[in-house]
Image (cartoon, rainbow, N blue to C red):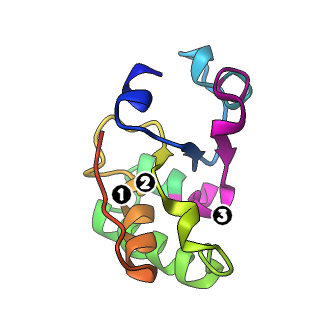
Amino acid sequence: MDVLDAVRVRTVWDIRLWRTSTYVPFYSGDNLAATLGPRYEYHPEFAPTAEILAAYKDGRITWPDYERMYRELLATRHPTDGIDPATFDRICLLCTEKSAAQCHRRLAAEHIVDHFTDIEIVHL
């Protein structure tokens, strides 16, 4: 919460496929929703499919393959359609990877920036 408050995050968007955490129960969606209240939102439209995620985790596809497949998924889902650009003011995309380098949250952020002007990506 301190980090979120320090950078004035208005809303945390949980974009994970599964909102549960075996190893860190606090990180489960229900617990985050209880802690963050209205600052927490679940946005599965930005989550990868189970098939894409499993293929990457199992080593059947490479990171460049994952990127391509995830970007294609977003192109078919159109997750930003109908969203007021002001909605993206000070949101934090939440996932489980420590680094955004090989995480779909970076790709989701880039997708958002591609569809709206004057949005800056800051990785926490």
Q: Can you give x and y, in whole percent of width and height, for residue 67 in the image?
A: 37, 68
Front in this rendered view, residue 51 or 42? 42
Instruction: Return the x and y of residue 114 as percentages of the image width and height.
Output: 38, 80
State if disc 1 and disc 2 touch (CB < 8 Å). Answer: yes
Q: Position of residue 55 (x, y in %)?
A: 48, 57
Q: Gap between marks 3 and 2, in whole Å?
A: 12 Å
Secondary structure beneath dot 2 equals helix
- The residue drawn where x is 40% and y is 62% is 109
First in residue order: circle 3 vs circle 2: 3
Amino acid bearing label 1: Arg
Left or right of residue 32: residue 48: left
> Is 43 colored magenta in this rendering?
yes
* Rendering coords of residue 124 (x, y %): 30, 39
Q: Amino acid at mark 3?
A: Glu
Q: In the image, what residue occupies the spot 57% across and 23% down? A: 27
The residue that mark 3 highlights is: 45
Which numbered tag is attached to residue 105?
2
Q: Which residue is mark 1?
A: 106
Residue drawn at (54%, 72%) of the image = 85
Q: In the image, is 22 to the left or to the right of 52?
A: right
Whether label 3 touches label 2, CB < 8 Å? no
Secondary structure under badge 3?
helix
Q: Amino acid at mark 2?
A: Arg
For marks 3 and 1, the one nearer the N-term is 3
* Drawn side of residue 1 relative to residue 117, left or right: right
Question: The magenta stretch spans which residues?
Answer: 32-52
- The crowd level at tag 3 (other Cα within 10 Å; few <14, some 14-19, many 20+) is some
State the separation of the CA atoms marked 3 and 1: 15 Å
